[in-house]
Image: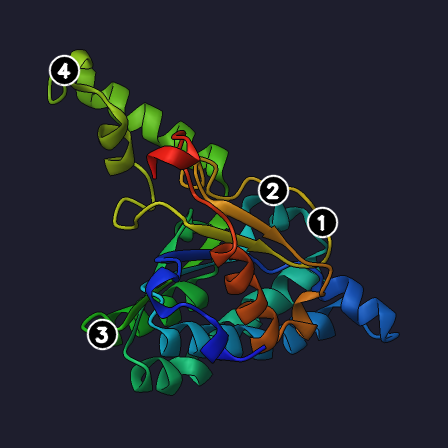
Amino acid sequence: MEEALLDQTRLPRHVAVIMDGNGRWAQKQGLMRVRGHEKGTKSVRQTVETCAQLGIAYLTLYAFSTENWKRPKIEVDTLMKLLVSSLRKELPTLQKNGIKLQAVGSLHQLPEKAQRELTEVMELTRENTNMHLTLALSYGSREELTTAVKLIAQDVVTEKLAVEAIEESTINKYLFTRDLPDVDLLIRTSGEHRISNFLLWQIAYAELYFTNTLWPDFRKEDLLQAFKNYQDRERRFGKTSEQL
């Protein structure tokens, strides 16, 4: 599919991606699962660059969930090393495309080396304004919401916040994603049809797009097809077609 077939005025503002299928891709090739994660970094680069070139303002990638810590130690260690090396390697790409890197999740759980590398790249790109790239790392939406409830309760107890003043916008301010708009399009690869504890609050009115393509095989054409599918839908936000 070609970019010319897309309506440039109707692209999603915030795209979120569940990058699934690295392990299965490797197994199909007769390789160790970690090889799939390595191969998947190429799909990350192409997705990030394509979104930046199209003018997508916000891109959020589900890189590592709170549940992923339960995986075999060798796989987790490899993923953390891959994170560090990828951040270092992709910095020129981020700078060239004017991309600001951010991260959400329980970042304190990451290894110190990963935390340092992440902080450094975020600092070096903080003035970039072309696109906001957010990595969800050690992230779980239920943990995020639980943390928000605790912080709100604490502010109510200390009288910094009145109960009657709590509304949707208040909750947004206590989330890890407080600086991000709601998701317009959520993409999940690998054929799975579930959300896996990702941005449960933020995808309330997102369009969901599922593809059988495994993440290491996800290319620019696949991303453009997801955008075309998004544009073929009618987003009503509770209204009728006649009201739009």
Is 35 situated above or below 174?
below
Q: Mark 4: which amino acid?
A: Ala
Task: Please give the residue where the numbered disc 3 appears in the rendered image.
Answer: 128
Is 109 situated above or below 80?
above
How are the residues colored?
A: rainbow
Callout 1: few (<14), some (14-19), or many (20+) C-alpha neighbours within 10 Å? Answer: some
Q: Quadrant of the C terminus?
A: top left
What is the spatial separation of the Cα atoms under label 1 and label 2, in whole angstroms? 10 Å
Q: Residue 152 appears in which quarter of the rendering? A: top left
Q: Mark 1: which amino acid?
A: Glu
What is the spatial separation of the Cα atoms under label 3 and label 4, in whole angstroms? 37 Å
Task: Please give the residue where the numbered disc 4 appears in the rendered image.
Answer: 162
Give the mark toward the camera: 1 or 4.
1
Of callouts 1 and 4, the N-terminal one = 4
Residue 155 or residue 12, whichever sits in front: 12
Whether label 1 touches label 4, CB < 8 Å = no
- Residue 76 locus on image (x, y percent): 63, 60
What is the spatial separation of the Cα atoms under label 4 and label 2, in whole angstroms? 33 Å
Whether label 1 touches label 2, CB < 8 Å = yes
Callout 3: few (<14), some (14-19), or many (20+) C-alpha neighbours within 10 Å? Answer: some
